Amino acid sequence: MRVSNLLKKLIPNSALVVLSLSLITTASPAQASTFTRNSPTSAGLLPTGVSEVGGIVLDLIGANGTRVVSQLSANSLFHGVTEVDAPNITIGVQSGFNTSIISALGGGLKQAAIRFTLYDGDTSSSGLEWNYAKQQYEYIQFDNFDLNDNSLLVNGLNFGNWSAVNAQNTDYQGNAGDYGFSGGGFRAKLLDTAWVSTNDAGLLSDFYNSLVSSGQVTYELHDADPGDQYLDFKRGIAGDLIDVGQDPTIEDPKSVPEPSFGLGLLGFGVLGVSSLLQRKKSTNLAPNNP
Ligand SMILES: [Ca+2]
Ligand SMILES: [Ca+2]
Ligand SMILES: [Ca+2]
């Protein structure tokens, strides 16, 4: 039954293409989503090297206020079916948390936010469903396959329920989509983007320690009832966005020494130029910067 359900969900691809094309041609003027580009951390707006949608964006605020941002490209992420005997799927692994990145965080984390873009996540209570009688997709309210069945593991730590985050539908380039916000979860047969964030001191402490010991971030999805659905972290992303990614990058260096009181004005000037140069450098270093 599971296989046939899956096939039913996969088969009407041509219909989906037709629907997608009609949405593209009838859409009002494209409007870039502000939701996908604004992190819930206090640092807010994402740096320019990060794509509008797609991949996994990690936004960290260190104990000293320093921001470190990384992005795994959509192309490097999981797509497929959760297997019955494997409840945890690895979505992707972000490496590059070397000693200089770790030390820039000042010994801990104040905030963390993670952005996911997922097609057909099936953790919501609405989405597109194929209507056989009408031979078309319809946007309806229904309990998706994995409503409240999936949790997010980050370095093995539980970051919560995929159904609890508010996701926005966008087109393949990150323009706000016709289906708005989910109100909870990633919807069936739609491209949705959502932020997971935490200020929980205990969780952040455990996460920081895992960064120190492993030098990487492993993103996993735990499925309470594996084997019942397909999910895709690549599909629906524009060709020029699918490979966008960057290693962990210090976006707002705080390592420049404070100027002494006597050198206040001069120090301020030097600091300003220095931080400008550093900012420009880190922006230029971002791979795939358009
Ligand atoms: Ca399920
Ligand atoms: Ca499931
Ligand atoms: Ca699915």
Image (tube, rainbow, N blue to C red):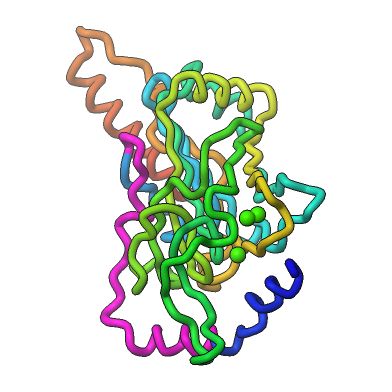
**Is 249 on the left or on the right of 45, as rendered?**
right
* Rendered location of residue 235, percent (x, y): 58, 69
In this view of the protein, which residue sits in the foreground, 40 or 221? 221
Which quadrant of the structure image shows residue 94?
Answer: top right
Taking the magenta stretch, the answer to whether it contains residue 220 is no
- Image quarter where the C terminus lies is bottom left
Task: Report the residue at 33% width, 49% height from top.
Answer: 38
Task: Report the residue at 51% width, 48% height from top.
Answer: 162
Question: Ligand 1 sits in which quadrant?
Answer: bottom right
**Is 102 on the left or on the right of 281, as rendered?**
right
Taking the magenta stretch, the answer to whether it contains residue 23 is yes
* Rendered location of residue 99, percent (x, y): 61, 24
Q: Which residues are magenta?
A: 16-43
- Image quarter where the N terminus lies is bottom right
* Rendered location of residue 91, percent (x, y): 65, 50
Task: Report the residue at 50% width, 19% height from top.
Answer: 202
Residue 16 visible in the current orientation? yes
Main secondary structure type of the part rendered in magenta? loop
| Residue 280 sits above or below residue 270 on the image | below
In this view of the protein, which residue sits in the foreground, 18 or 100? 18
**Is 113 on the left or on the right of 177, as rendered?**
right
| Residue 7 sits above or below residue 123 on the image | below
In this view of the protein, which residue sits in the foreground, 47 or 260? 47
Q: Residue furthest right?
A: 85
Task: Report the residue at 47% width, 58% height from top.
Answer: 124
Which quadrant of the structure image shows residue 224?
Answer: top right
Q: Residue furthest left?
A: 265
* Rendered location of residue 4, percent (x, y): 73, 75
